[in-house]
Image: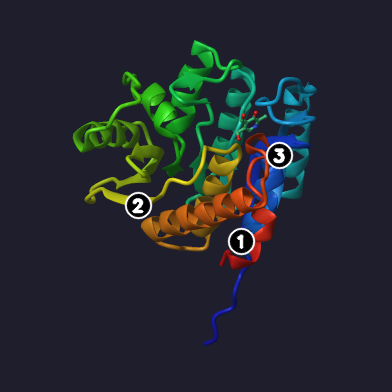
Amino acid sequence: MSFKYRQKKIALINDISGYGRCSLAVEIPVISALKVQCCPLITSILSNHTGYSTYFFDDYTDKMVPYIENWKKLGIHFDGIATGFLGSKEQIDIVKDFIEYYKEDDTIVVIDPVMGDHGRTYATYTKEMCAAMKRLLEHADITTPNLTEACVLTDTQYHDGKWKLSDLYDMACKITAQGPKKVVITGIIQGDFLANYIYEKGSEPKIVRSHKLGTERSGTGDIFASIISADAVNGVEFSESVKKASRFISRCIKKSIELDIPVKDGVCFEEVLHTLK
Ligand code: PXL
């Protein structure tokens, strides 16, 4: 009997920022390169990401419900649902309802709890939204917080120093106790290395390290979560996928330094996208 390949599809719940290489503007090409169909559910439209001194922001919350209602009429099945930047508590609640409606036994939900960086939550993030994000996490199979977000999710004090493995383990266990079976805590600085702490419920934790190159750039978290999401629906083993994502981002950063891309403009992933398989 011959096996017939079935292409997978993912609902991508995220904003679209016209400039600065983040959210849907990087998710769509990266996930498409991994041969997965992208179905965007847009949360807001920005002229550029919020890291610039000025931006136009159009909240799409009110449009999301009729948009989803139409998808329901089409009877679409998703192999994956991936969520990113969410702009309000109301939006987080809409996303929760979306997942409850669309999650079937074979649907993998990846939640990137985009809430902050460098020990601080983003200006748009209220305490209420952090609490709503914790509730959303109950629906995740996989989550990809950075260190700041892992601290928020577990009520752990953030610090810039060296993180003890036992503290990372405690945070990873607390996160998996909230719902997801798999977690990768990203962006842990270990001297000249950047580490990703991987924990799958019931398994030994693993660490994937890459050389720290230059300063952190916007959109790299979105590229990371995109590779994890596409690989998850394609059946790639979790730690292999983390390795792939971390190596690809290193190549993107190296190229961005070579081409003098301003840090705020993210990474010129376009130059190395052909290496992603
Ligand atoms: O990359 C995360 C992100 C997504 N969307 C918007 C952002 C950011 C980070 O700053 O501003 C609009």
Q: Outermost residue toward the bottom?
A: 1
Residue linked to disc 2 = 208
Indicate the amino acid at tag 2: Val
Q: Are marks 2 and 3 in contact (CB under 8 Å)?
A: no
Specify the quadrant of the image occupied by residue 141: top left
Q: Is residue 153 above or below residue 237?
A: above
Quadrant of ligand 1: it is top right
What is the secondary structure assignment of the residue under circle 3?
strand
Q: CA distance from mark 3 to mark 1?
A: 17 Å
Q: Which residue sits at x=59%, y=18%?
A: 89
Q: Position of residue 54 (x, y in %)?
A: 76, 20
Left or right: residue 101 compared with residue 187: right
Indicate the amino acid at tag 3: Leu
Looking at the picture, tell me which residue is in the foreground, 99 or 45. Answer: 45
Which mark sits nearer the N-terminus, 2 or 1?
1
Residue linked to disc 3 = 41
Q: Which residue sits at x=50%, y=53%?
A: 250
What is the secondary structure assignment of the residue under circle 2?
strand
Left or right: residue 75 compared with residue 195: right
